[in-house]
Image: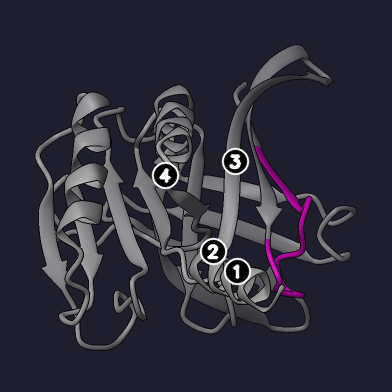
Amino acid sequence: MKEIIIIAVLFLLVGCSSPTVFLTTERLPQKERQELISALSENGFKVKATSGVMVPEEFPDVVVATNPANESPEFFAKLEQVIQQQNLEPVTYQKFYQQKHYYKGRNVGLYVRGNAPDLRLPPVLRGNHQTCNNQRMILEFNNNKRVNIDVEKEEITSYKGSYQSILPDTIHANFDRLESPVTLRLSKVSVETYAGMKSADKIVITKSDNKVLPENCEFMIIHY
């Protein structure tokens, strides 16, 4: 009986210590992203998709980030085999001692940049005060991956930041004066106007922990 208990405890410890693959993608179509997650899971990898994390510009298209003490040849060989089976670019390994791309223990980060075209974002959109905490806002995108939001109250408060597309219709944005990243989704819609039905670009905040930019806050530009 004692031996059975010891074996059970050891099994639990091994299960709890299974490394996690933290997946960060950019410009990877949703279908390919889901196929990669499924392939990793089916091969025994524990996968956690990140949110609000960007693929650094200096990274090659496929990077496995780990810490210098993580030496698991069989694990990395199997991981690389799964990645190759998805017809992705060759794997490059990066080792980090600290800071945001450091992964503790046996956990690793997998960064994948796809080849989907960059989002063509409208330069200026106006916020819907009814969905944005009764705030009047202007959302602006620049060609250099910079984004700006002006909140119009008694005075105009500006929040500047950068953005990166992670899916063909989705971007992550980091603002200098906001606590956490924001996820936005772009869609094409038709709206009724005084001049009849018109097409419009609509952006919705799909994930946010910031009061300034609440979830479901909508921005729109109508094309007359």
Q: Is residue 57 above or below residue 89?
A: below
Q: Position of residue 7 (x, y in %)?
A: 57, 69
Q: Which callout, 3 or 2, points to the residue nearer the camera?
A: 2
Separation (CA) of disc 4 from disc 2: 31 Å
Q: Is the residue under label 4 in contact with that under label 1 (CB below 8 Å)? A: no
Q: Amino acid at mark 4?
A: Ile
Q: Earlier in the sequence, mark 4 or mark 2?
A: 2
Give the class, few, some or many, for how many residues have Cα within 10 Å of label 2's Cα (few <14, many ≥20).
Answer: few
Give the class, few, some or many, for how many residues have Cα within 10 Å of label 4's Cα (few <14, many ≥20).
Answer: many
Q: Is the residue under label 2 in contact with that under label 1 (CB below 8 Å)? A: yes
> Can you identify the residue that label 1 sits on?
12
Separation (CA) of disc 1 from disc 4: 36 Å
Range shown magenta: 208-220
Residue that lies at the very extreme toward the front in this rendered image:
1
Q: Position of residue 41 (x, y in %)?
A: 48, 39
The circle drawn on residue 185 is: 3
**Along the line of sight, which residue is nearer the eye, 90 or 114?**
90
Residue that lies at the very extreme toward the bottom in this rendered image:
98
Q: Is the residue under label 2 in contact with that under label 4 (CB below 8 Å)? A: no
Q: Amino acid at mark 2?
A: Gly
Give the class, few, some or many, for how many residues have Cα within 10 Å of label 3's Cα (few <14, many ≥20).
Answer: some
Q: Earlier in the sequence, mark 3 or mark 2?
A: 2
Q: Earlier in the sequence, mark 1 or mark 4?
A: 1
Position of residue 161 in the picture relative to residue 4 (left or right): left
> Can you identify the residue that label 2 sits on?
15
**Residue 82 image-quadrant placement:** top left
Element on which disc 4 rests: strand
Q: Earlier in the sequence, mark 3 or mark 4?
A: 4
The circle drawn on residue 166 is: 4
Q: Amino acid at mark 1?
A: Leu
Residue at point 49%, 68% (across, down):
14
